[in-house]
Image: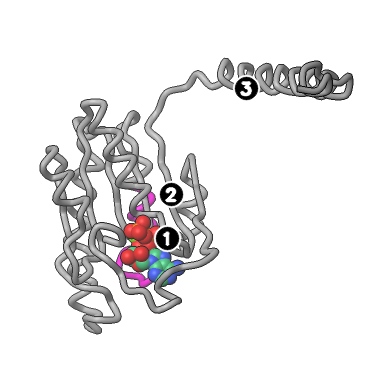
Amino acid sequence: MTDNQEIPSRSEERKAERHKQRQQKVKATVDAKIAAAQEEKGILLVLTGNGKGKSTSGFGTVARSVGHGKKAAVVQFIKGNWDCGERTLLEGAGVEFHVMGTGFTWETQDRDKDTQAAKTAWEAAEKLLQDERIDCVMLDELTYMVSYHYLDVERVIEALKNRPKMQHVIVTGRACHRAIIELADTVSEVLPIKHAFDHGIKAQPGFDY
Ligand code: ATP
Ligand code: MG
């Protein structure tokens, strides 16, 4: 071994010292933020955007909730042609599911039927949003019900505002209405950088649904 490898050079020592100082500053900032964030309340989380990962992220949070022994429920506002894998798993873990009884809007092409199905699913959602025993409610693909005018945004906002104080709610779907985003505590937008489907790869069970 050469001397160079055994003894760190002065510039490496200085680098290590600068790294340590930067990390100490980061730690001080993070510690101050942790100390300041003391409020506990139910979070309204919106997962929106055109990229893949909104529903899976929502189901991940539901799984987290169940893992802590909490009670969760899911309302799915769009039912695809495929059975969703998370439903099988989470129903087995005691999560209540309500699935809107129609397919994607561009498949049913029946506005009255879709509106009625959306209203029925929303009634189930409203019941959950009044139930103190439910710790976490996921409203999967709710955004479309508002953007297609199947549901009034005011009615949605009112139910979200009046829910039990400690209840968490997750809303997923593209193009979320501004009023829901404004009311939310946490909003994440998933951006598509690439999607396999655009390269001719079909949706696969156990990965896409
Ligand atoms: P996931 O359920 O995988 O988390 P998502 O909820 O973000 O996806 P949705 O808009 O609900 O996405 O679409 C559901 C289905 O469409 C999934 O099978 C997903 O793989 C697929 N998908 C999501 N984003 C895209 C995209 N940008 N292009 C094509 N297909 C997509
Ligand atoms: Mg989705």
Work out how far the residue at label 3 is from the one at label 1, CA to CA, in angstroms.
30 Å
Sequence-first disc among 1 and 2: 2
Residue at point 22%, 38% (across, down) = 72
Residue at point 19%, 31% (across, down) = 133
Looking at the rendered image, the quarter that the C terminus falls into is bottom left
Q: Which residue is mark 2?
A: 46
Work out how far the residue at label 2 is from the one at label 3, CA to CA, in angstroms.
24 Å
79 or 197: nearer the eye?
A: 197
Looking at the rendered image, the quarter that the N terminus falls into is top right
Sequence-first disc among 3 and 1: 3
Q: Residue 134: x, y in percent?
A: 21, 35
209 or 117: nearer the eye?
A: 209
Q: Residue 123: x, y in percent?
A: 19, 54
Q: Which residue is mark 1?
A: 52
Check the image and name the residue furthest to the bottom.
Answer: 109
Per the image, is 68 magenta? Answer: no
Task: Look at the picture and state if 61 lies above or below 140.
Answer: above
- In screen coordinates, is 190 left or right of 54? right
Is residue 79 something one can see in this rendering?
Answer: yes
Mark in front: 2 vs 3: 3
Asked whether disc 2 touches disc 3, contact meaning CB atoms under 8 Å apart, the reply is no
| Amino acid, disc 3 | Val
Sequence-first disc among 2 and 3: 3
Q: Is mark 1 within 8 Å of ligand 1?
A: yes
The secondary element bearing badge 1 is classed as: loop
Q: Which residues are magenta?
A: 148-158
Q: Is mark 3 within 8 Å of ligand 1?
A: no
Q: Which residue is mark 3?
A: 30
- In screen coordinates, is 126 left or right of 162? left
The secondary element bearing badge 3 is classed as: helix
Q: Tell me if mark 2 has few (under 14), some (14-19) or many (20+) residues whose alpha carbon lies within 10 angstroms of its own.
A: many
Mark in front: 1 vs 2: 1
